[in-house]
Image (cartoon, grey):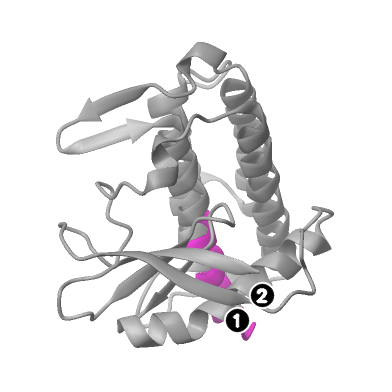
Amino acid sequence: MVYRLYLESGPQKKKTMVHVVDLPGCVVTGPTTDEALRRTPAVIRHYRELLKKHGVVVECLEDEIQIEVAQHIMEGSWLGNGDPALLVPTDLEPLTAEKRERSIQCAECMRAELLELVNGLSDEQWMAQPEKGRSIRSILQHIFGAEYQYIRGYFGKLDGVKGPGPVETMGRGELLAWMAFVRVRELEAIRAWPVEEQARQSTHGQQIKTASKVMRRMLEHQWEHLLEINDRVGVEI
């Protein structure tokens, strides 16, 4: 199967993010464009295996992975880091019921994998502060906060949720339970999105937002940090 790639980096092709738009949320980063592209087939394979592991039907699973650069974007302010202003062609497509459910499936697979990873950690691993970066607890808080903002900011108010809550003071079990509760409310908001609004575009500063773009970025953000946690616990890809 051939996977279309949308790349973002500066003109010198240093830090690069690869968007694999045929797999909702799948991104690959590297210190250079060449390194990011070199890693892409392995990350695609890992992503497909994760979907299969959690019960999602993956078409052409046994096919050879082929990649094709559809566009290399080299103008923007946050290139290589998930530029929020980036707009790829699939962002302008309506968020149909089929596309929405596929994205939700992918989000749930990532969440299940994340919980599997963190539930196996000791308290010391959960709170350990590395020389560079954040503790795994802090990464989880960051994922949760960003996810809430993506959904609340575009799809509307979440029933029974006034905000992401005082997560800084929550214990591990309480935090994970709160994340699960808010996730249910998030999916309700996404599924309640009116059909006539599927292709609506809104402008926020220099950014164009669509429902498809918001779903893409929410999934990509989760995937980036799932890979980060994988790396922290020694999972090689």
Q: Residue at x 61, y 34 (%)?
A: 100
Q: Which residues are magenta?
A: 222-237
Q: Which mark is residue 172?
A: none
Screen quadrant of the N terminus: bottom right
Is 22 positioned to the left or the right of 205 in the image? Answer: right
Q: Amino acid at mark 1?
A: Ala
Q: Which mark is residue 42?
A: 1
Magenta: main secondary structure: helix
Q: Quick check: 207 above or below 221?
A: above
Is residue 194 at least partly visible in the picture? Answer: no
Question: How many numbered circles does the render carry?
Answer: 2
Distance between the alpha carbons at the discs numbered 1 and 2: 5 Å
Badge 1 marks a residue whose secondary structure is helix
As drawn, the label of residue 45 is 2
Q: Is residue 89 above or below residue 62?
A: above
Is residue 160 one of those drawn in magenta?
A: no
Residue 190, picture quadrant: top right
Rendered location of residue 84, percent (x, y)? 28, 48
x, y percentage for residue 23?
Answer: 59, 57
Magenta-span inclusion, residue 234: yes
The answer to whether residue 130 is visible is yes
Disc 1 to disc 2: CB gap under 8 Å: yes
Please state the horizontal and vertical placement of residue 55, each as a whole percent of the image: 84, 54
Depth check, front residue: 225 or 195: 195
